[in-house]
Image (cartoon, helix red, strand yellow):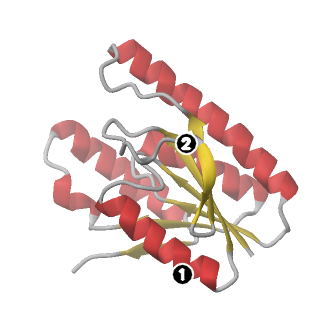
Amino acid sequence: MKLVVITTGSYPYGGAATNRHVSYLKGLVELGVKVHLLILQKDNHQSNLSNKSTGVFQGIQYEYATWHSTANAHLFVKIFSKLKALWVAKKKLIRIIEDSDPDLRLLILTTKPVETYPFLKFAKKKGIPSFHERTEYPFLNSTSFIQKVELTYYLKYIIPKFDGVFVITH
């Protein structure tokens, strides 16, 4: 079986989310799952140790869709960079699917609808089972009006489309 993971962040070294993902993905590798981590773009707080755009770490193959940071960029540049990252990641996902065995699964770790929905829709169209991981209940950090609108869309239109969702909480 092959598992393609769509995410953002600093890999293979980063913060708590990176460490959590690497921990359970490493366990899946040890069980014989081929894991391919597809990272949309560099994190604004990228670890200096995560200085390669592609590689293998503890049996986990990883690659970035785009290899540039937009931390101090103008809003237009950030939006363009995000759209480019989504487009490039989809092309890379198509390549991975074409090169893979039919027993493929998709794990989407992104939480923003603009980052999640295109891959979820693509997986459904291709008949690829798709799953989602949350580290907390999504409503815990939704305080602003925009966050609440985004949360409503996420809960009503995105979550029901997954084949499975697991929440890591305490």
Q: Nearer the viewer, residue 68 or 152?
A: 68
Relative side of 83 to 42, left or right: right
* 121, 48: nearer the viewer: 48
90 versus 99 height, above or below: above
- Specify whether residue 137 is in view: yes
User: Quadrant of residue 129 in the image?
Assistant: bottom right
Answer with the quarter of the image where residue 31 lies. Answer: bottom right
Question: Could you tell me which secondary element the residue under label 1 belongs to?
Answer: helix
- Give the class, few, some or many, for how many residues have Cα within 10 Å of label 2's Cα (few <14, many ≥20): few
Q: Residue at x 53, y 27 (%)?
A: 83
Q: Earlier in the sequence, mark 2 or mark 1?
A: 1
Residue visible at 42% across and 15% down? 77
Q: Identify the residue position indicated by label 1 in the image.
A: 27
Q: Amino acid at mark 1?
A: Gly
Residue found farthest to the front: 49
Q: Say which of 25 and 106 sits in front.
A: 25
Q: Position of residue 25 (x, y in %)?
A: 53, 72
**On-image quarter of the N terminus:** bottom right
Q: At x 17% / y 39%, what residue is drawn?
A: 145
Q: Position of residue 80 (x, y in %)?
A: 49, 19
**Residue 52: image tag:** 2
